[in-house]
Amino acid sequence: MKFELAPLPYAYDALEPHIDARTMEIHHSKHHAAYTNNLNAALENSPLAGQSIQELMTSGFDTPAIRNNGGGFYNHNLFWEIMTPGGANQPEGDLAKAINDAFGSMEAFKDAFAKAATTRFGSGWAWLCVHKGGKVEVCSTPNQDNPLMPGSCGGFPILGIDVWEHAYYLHYQNRRPDYINAFFNVINWSIVGEKYNANK
Ligand code: MN
């Protein structure tokens, strides 16, 4: 069984003007496609072949190629999903309460998330994670790691931002903070809330 690159569930220009169509097209059809193909190649002769992507993330890896490309496959699937156009533009219900409990306010959460994304040196991701019991936390990981991986920052990722330069450089060049600010405009909080409820 091979992992497959799912079509983007909306048009490449659906997140304009915050994230431009050309960036989305290259990011999905080239970068995410490469992680998918390289993951399949790395699993060809591995005892880990046949695991689900989530099992693969949590069980550890026998090669760096499986870690890096498996993380790339998993992380981008989540990234496209939580940027789906439409839905709530603010956290609602239990997720809104958890964010307020953890950070004090939505603005304080945004500051913490933006700081994690801005200060991640080099390539990586910033995350909002939920722990069993419902507590939420912001953290960041290098490369294509994610909070599910053994020894990582922990919890289940319900929101993530890709801060690799390939995610923003065409439109924002070196202005990572502008890209991070723009990202808050395209989060589908209905989807993030569903993930919170399913994994708390
Ligand atoms: Mn990426």
Image (tube, grey):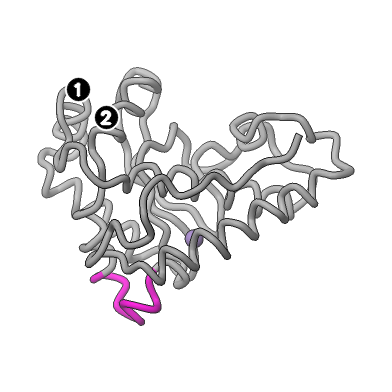
Question: Can residue 172 be found in the magenta stretch?
Answer: yes
Q: Nearer the viewer, residue 73 or 59?
A: 73
Which mark, by number, is residue 94?
A: 1
Give the image location of residue 35, x and y in percent: 64, 56
Majority secondary structure in the magenta region: helix
**Callout 2 touching callout 1 (CB < 8 Å):** yes
Residue carrying label 2: 193
Amino acid at dot 1: Asp
Query: In the drawing, does residue 1 fall left or right of residue 82?
Result: right
State which quarter of the image contains the C terminus.
top left
Does the Cβ of the disc 2 residue fall within 8 Å of ligand 1? Answer: no
Q: Residues within 10 Å of mark 1 (few under 14, many from 20)?
A: some
Whether 140 is drawn above or below 94: the answer is: below
Question: Is residue 50 found left or right of 140 in the rendered image?
Answer: right
Locate residue 66, reporting x and y percent.
Answer: 72, 48
Q: Is residue 58 above or below residue 43?
A: above
Report which quarter residue 9 is drawn in. Answer: top left
The answer to whether residue 101 is left or right of residue 180 is: left
User: Which one is nearer the viewer's eye here, 15 or 68?
Assistant: 15
